[in-house]
Image (tube, grey):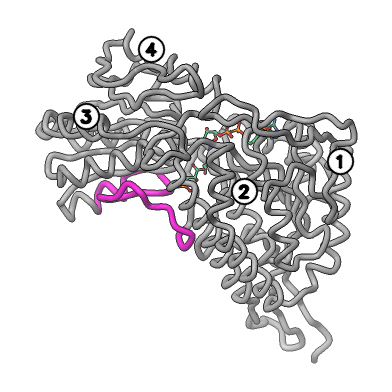
Amino acid sequence: MKRDALYIDGEWTAADSGKTIDVVNPATGAVIGTVPDAGAAETRKAILSAERAFESYSQTTAADRAAKLHKLHDLILDHQDDLARMLTEEQGKPLTEARAEIGMSAAYVRWFAEEARRVYGEIIPSPWQDRQLHATREPIGVVAAITPWNFPSSMLARKIAPALAAGCTVVAKPASQTPYSGLIWGQLCEAAGFARGVVNVVTGDARTIGAELCSNQAVRKVTFTGSTQVGKILLRQAADTVKKVSMELGGNAPFIVFDDADLDAAVAGAIAAKFRNSGQTCVCTNRVYVQDGIHDAFMARFATAIEALKMGNGLEDDVQAGPLIDENSLAKVEEFVADAQAKGGNITLGGKRLRSRGFFFAPTLIENANDDMRLSREEVFGPLAPVFKFTSEEEVLRRANATEFGLAAYFYTQSLGRAMRVSRALEYGIVGINEGLVTTEVAPFGGFKESGVGREGGPHGIEDYLEIKYVCMGGLG
Ligand SMILES: NC(=O)C1=CN([C@@H]2O[C@H](COP(=O)(O)OP(=O)(O)OC[C@H]3O[C@@H](n4cnc5c(N)ncnc54)[C@H](OP(=O)(O)O)[C@@H]3O)[C@@H](O)[C@H]2O)C=CC1
Ligand SMILES: O=C(O)[C@H](O)CS(=O)(=O)O
């Protein structure tokens, strides 16, 4: 199924320069293929194609768009195994997680196939006898979508699906480390019946492509998932042409275990929220806070559960933890471990690279973590579980909220009163109570503070791809 060319205006092409980018399997370090290294000229072509296609696509009926999206949903599931295998080969996650991600992509497409037919307007009670007022919701226009390597399929689904449902056209740029899971959307959308130019996918130099997408007048919206650092660059660039933006950025999730928690549930939740995708998700637990009374019992069981994780090539059976995405990520995790050790942390498990080939880092448990460590302030994006002790509810809430991020937070308690108090006090866009895996297409996904702008999925997800038009019809006196 692999496509290794640009998808522009319904055609598969090379970069103008003929240059390519190598794609590496992070489990082996081997080059598994190449994709075009496109630049501004190819991006402009893609934008022009999307602009032309928008003239007709924006006039299609909601029913027609919904039908095509349902067809796209079916095609994704028909090819789930092939798409999952391709994703694991370029990203490294275990095949079970890759299949789940492809399933999530299909779920987002189905959700927005349904939402497409629920874009209503309003008739407004007029303050004038001779005028009728109404408001309509219209597709915003050409959408630029830039996506990360950690969920190369579902992050694109979360953008392409609402855009197509609303009547918008798209130019997408997947991450260079995981381009195949992005390019294949061109083939899938074409097979689902979307006309040429409705969806375009380009790979290449991120800065150049991004600058063109953010500055080109024909692009009316930029939607991005990735680091807060890059999100700020795009926000600045998009400001010059006042583009609408959606930003899903970095996180620094606290995972709080109170004395009255169900211990087994808390350990299972901590494993799920910390080690999914080897810790490379924006909603991964970054800090584990455990109350004094339950700390030793939690640590004993948490260590046993971490030791039981099977690390390896995601294509192998029963693997639960794959490699990190690249050498830079490995080096960054090593820096976090060295900093924690230098500041009094005890490396109880792991703490080092594994294997000579591939980018594997052992699932790691750090005891006696403290707020001076870099890993308490910065997003680790790796399989490091630092455990911090706390005494009171007030103290842990102050520490949990002491960050510029506000994406996801988790806590475990069996007290209803505490659940209500703590949920309200946490400054995060996503809160899991007694649950470590909370993502679903039916709920709004997004963050407070520097974790982003807007919400994806759920009943609000399509709103970011629509403009509201107020119409005042006069002369009716
Ligand atoms: N809130 C959320 O839902 C999510 C947040 N994230 C956050 O992203 C980070 C890890 O993902 P990662 O992919 O490394 O993030 P990056 O921000 O480095 O890259 C994300 C995407 O942006 C592109 N990009 C990089 N620099 C620029 C630029 N100057 N202009 C335009 N595009 C650019 C990349 O292209 P290229 O690959 O070619 O460099 C890639 O496609 C973590 O901080 C994580 O928390 C990740 C996933 C979800
Ligand atoms: O990119 C991410 O980290 C995803 O948003 C995580 S999730 O949506 O799969 O939970």
Say what secondary structure mark 4 lies in: helix
- Residue 157 screen position, x and y as percent: 60, 54
Three-letter amino acid code at the position of disc 4: Asp
Three-letter amino acid code at the position of disc 3: Ala
What's the CA distance linking mark 3 and mark 4? 21 Å
Q: To which residue does mark 3 refer?
A: 303
Comparing labels 4 and 1, the label whose residue is closer to the camera: 1
Say what secondary structure mark 3 lies in: helix
Give the magenta range: 420-443
**Around disc 3, counting alpha carbons within 10 Å, would you say few (fewer than 14), some (14 to 19), or many (20 or more)?**
some
The residue located at (69%, 75%) in the rendering is: 62
The residue located at (62%, 38%) in the rendering is: 178
Does ligand 2 reach within 8 Å of label 3's beta carbon? Answer: no
Disc assigned to residue 339: 4
The earlier-in-sequence mark between 1 and 3 is 1
Three-letter amino acid code at the position of disc 2: Ser
Say what secondary structure mark 1 lies in: helix
Q: What is the quadrant of residue 284 in the picture?
A: top left
